[in-house]
Image (cartoon, rainbow, N blue to C red):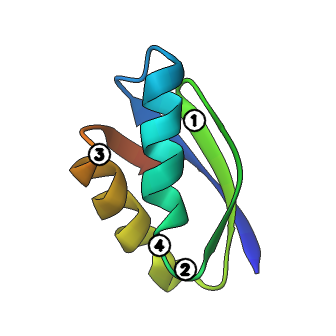
Amino acid sequence: MSAITLRIDGMHCGACVRRVTQALQRVEGAEVQEVRIGAARMEVLDAGSTPALLVSIAKAGFSAHVEE
């Protein structure tokens, strides 16, 4: 597993954190470590999981990118 951090735009409250957390928990191959306003940290089985994470966040109503 490898750690990644996603920068998430548009989050501003606890409800946003909850929506993003729930969306990320649905992605197979990813283990959510922490979600806070503006970012999420997780462990993924492989880099192939990253696009699914970004799509899941988009479906929750936010945009995101991988922090390099």
Q: Earlier in the sequence, mark 1 or mark 3?
A: 1
- Badge nearest the viewer, 2 or 4: 4
Q: Which mark is residue 47?
A: 2
Q: Are marks 4 and 1 in contact (CB under 8 Å)?
A: no
Q: Earlier in the sequence, mark 2 or mark 4?
A: 4
| Residue that mark 3 sits on | 60
45 vs 24: above or below: below
| Residue that mark 4 sits on | 27
Residue closer to the observer: 64 or 36:
36
Few, some or many residues within 10 Å of mark 3 (<14, 14–19, 20+): some
Q: Are marks 3 and 2 in contact (CB under 8 Å)?
A: no
Task: Write down the quadrant of residue 43 in the picture.
Answer: bottom right
Instruction: Look at the numbered disc 1 and give the secondary structure of its residue.
Output: strand
Residue name at image x 45 percent, y 43 percent: 20
Q: Is residue 8 left or right of residue 10?
A: right
Which amino acid lies under the numbered mark 3 shown in the image of this protein?
Answer: Ala
- Badge nearest the viewer, 3 or 2: 3
Task: Write down the quadrant of residue 36 in the picture.
Answer: top right
Q: How many marks?
A: 4
Q: Which mark is residue 39?
A: 1
